[in-house]
Amino acid sequence: MSSQEPLILSIETATTTGSIAIAEGSRILLSKKGDGLISHSNTLLSDIDDLVKQTDRDFEKIDLFAIAIGPGSFTGLRIGIATIKALGTIANRMCAAIPTLEAVARSAGANSSVVATLPAGRGEVFAQLFSVSAEGSVTEIDQPAHLPPREVIKKYQSLANLSWTGEGAEAHRAEILSAKGAAESNWNIVSVATNLAENVSALALLKAANNELVTPENLRAIYVRPSDAELKK
């Protein structure tokens, strides 16, 4: 991979809409959000092809493939990871595996304490506490969990100056902001990122600089909880 301004293709299929981005180093050339009413399996490859063509770059010139590895939609994650595995193998390129909640946390901007959230199904949310530096690096403070919203609030109720972000926080905004002590503790909710793949790309660039890339065959999803099919066994 080129040491300067690598061409990065990033995809995020962990959320309902999903997104794609192409960047040259830290500069986003073009990005696109998906359609939440259409399965990623129906449009992902054609959307990638269209985006590459629109940036006037050749697929063979892509230096790095990045993927949000979860948690998130089980089906979406499998589609996205399988796609990046195939593209990375064809191009003989290394890949960046980015935890979805890290990308969500980064989308909130610099913050010493931010809870990144995503819907987890069955009324629960995925949640994890991070700090985000002014340079955009993300540090996990605890481990990802899937819990009912009230349990997530209880988990972090002792923290002051706390930001919440992600689709899970947006869905439970009223419950979070009306929680006991929320006002006194200066809690706030930061709007959801419009294109999560752009944050996946930025974190991939950091992984490349830190020699933390993986081969396509070593990409693994972070599910956090068993799938519904596994729970029914």
Image (cartoon, grey):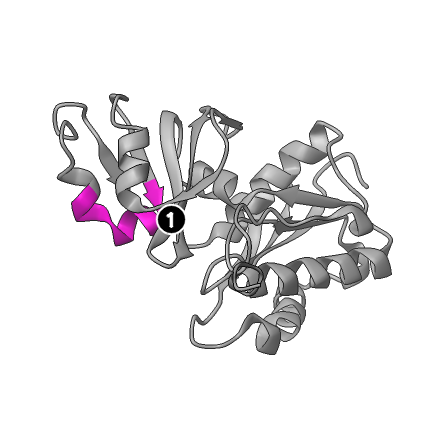
For the residue pair 15 and 229, the one nearer the viewer reads as 229
Amino acid type of the residue that numbered disc 1 sits on in the rendered structure: Val
Does residue 215 appear to the left or right of 152 in the view shown?
right
Q: In this view, does 32 lie above or below 178?
A: below
Residue 64 image point, x, y percent: 74, 47
For the residue pair 167 and 92, the one nearer the viewer reads as 167
What secondary structure do most residues of the magenta stretch adopt?
helix
Does residue 118 appear to the left or right of 76 in the view shown?
left
Taking the spot 56% from the left edge, 45% from the top edge, the residue there is 200
Residue 85 image point, x, y percent: 76, 57
Q: Is residue 22 above or below residue 163?
A: below
Query: Quick check: is 171 in the magenta stretch?
Result: yes
Residue range in magenta is 165-175
Residue 105 image point, x, y percent: 43, 37
Disc 1: which residue = 125
Q: Please identify the quarter of the rendering in which residue 202 is found.
A: top right
Q: In this view of the protein, can residue 26 be seen by the observer?
A: no
Q: Which quarter of the rendered picture does the C terminus lie within?
A: bottom right
